[in-house]
Image: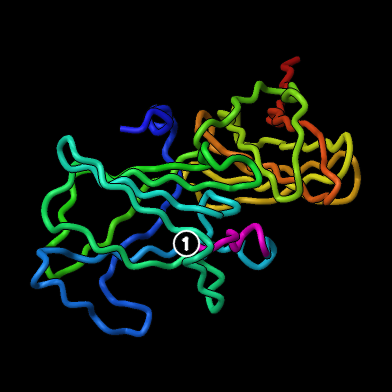
């Protein structure tokens, strides 16, 4: 197994990338009777709808999971000691849906795992920004299977309550992921742009979008309702063509009440 995929096994649960169905884009079903294979259809938007239009996708709409930009998707099908790898990239672009779409023909049978890695080429062509897995599934010969692949930020930075992260540099549409454990029922997330312009998108423990931190001021904040001890994720994105630098932090905003008996 590729070593870069091992790290995310210990990260908190995030997101869902829906893979499955054996219908081709034109609605026909490919015959695989002679090959002993089944088909898996993969579809993922190039830009998360929440990032593209956050004010219209705050409802828990399909596709608004914990990812930002997608250039390449790597799929590793694991069966025993065998690993079969497939890729989707801009050659698989569907302009009608602004998505990467492909139908993958794989051998039918039982699989131990499917590893999924999503790459933003602005960040890296070798290290994914989000990854995920699904275990113990069967691809039926001449049939199809729908797989709900749980997604994780590949290597999020853990934030400390009330302390800014180290300054990071962002190219246009570059992204960096952070995580924090909510200290109380209310948490403030702040993004500070030292140069350029930064936006941030907050995802809850279920990987669905919660809120965004945007604006032209150097420092912008948002107050969100949180569940104590639950893990939340912040994706900071560079918005300036000339590059940006900045930091992010979260802060406990729980109030207190003092009662005095006289």
Q: Quadrant of residue 37?
A: bottom left
Mark 1: few/some/many CA within 10 Å (<14, 14-19, 20+): many
Q: In which quarter of the image is the N terminus?
A: top left
Judge left or right: residue 93 versus residue 81: right
Residue drawn at the location 68% of the way across and 30% of the way down: 254
How many marks the image carries: the answer is 1
Residue 27: x percent and y percent? 32, 84
Quadrant showing the C terminus: top right
Is residue 254 rendered to the left or right of residue 241? left
Is 239 rendered above or below residue 154?
below
Q: Where is residue 8 in the image (x, y as percent from the top left)?
A: 42, 32
User: Within the image, what quadrant is residue 20 found in?
Assistant: bottom left
Q: Give the range drawn in magenta.
A: 45-52
Q: Residue at x 53, y 49 (%)?
A: 66
147 vs 250: above or below: below
Q: Where is residue 38 in the image (x, y as percent from the top left)?
A: 18, 65
Dividing the picture into quarters, in which one does residue 142 lie? bottom left
Q: Name the residue under label 1.
A: 44
Q: Where is residue 10 in the image (x, y as percent from the top left)?
A: 39, 27
Looking at the picture, does residue 236 appear above or below residue 50? above
Left or right of residue 162: residue 99:
left
- Secondary-structure class at tag 1: strand
Q: Residue 218 vs residue 239: left or right?
A: right
| Residue located at (60% from left, 60% from top) | 47
């Amino acid at each position: 197994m590729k070593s870069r995929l091992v790290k995310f096994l210990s990260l908190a649960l995030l997101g869902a990338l829906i893979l499955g169905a054996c219908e081709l884009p034109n609605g026909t079903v490919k015959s695989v009777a002679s090959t002993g294979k089944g088909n898996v259809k993969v579809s993922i938007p190039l830009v998360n709808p929440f990032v593209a239009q956050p004010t219209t996708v705050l409802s828990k709409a399909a596709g608004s999971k914990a990812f930002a930009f997608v250039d390449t998707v790597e799929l590793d099908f694991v069966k025993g000691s065998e690993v079969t790898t497939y890729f989707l990239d801009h050659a698989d672009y569907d302009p009608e849906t602004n998505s990467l779409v492909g139908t993958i023909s794989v051998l039918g049978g039982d699989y131990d795992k499917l590893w999924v890695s999503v790459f933003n080429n602005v960040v890296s062509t070798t290290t994914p920004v989000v990854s995920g897995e699904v275990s113990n599934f069967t691809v039926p010969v001449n049939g199809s299977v729908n797989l709900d692949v749980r997604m994780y930020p590949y290597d999020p930075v853990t934030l400390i309550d009330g302390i800014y992260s180290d300054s990071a540099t962002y190219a246009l549409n570059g992204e960096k992921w952070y995580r924090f454990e909510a200290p109380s029922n209310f948490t403030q997330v702040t993004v500070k742009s030292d140069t350029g312009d930064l936006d941030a998108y907050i995802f809850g423990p279920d990987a669905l979008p919660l809120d965004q931190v945007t604006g032209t001021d150097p420092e912008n904040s948002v107050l969100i309702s949180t569940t104590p001890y639950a893990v939340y994720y912040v994706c900071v994105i560079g918005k300036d063509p000339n590059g940006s630098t900045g930091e992010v932090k979260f802060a406990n905003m729980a109030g207190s009440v003092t009662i005095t008996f006289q």
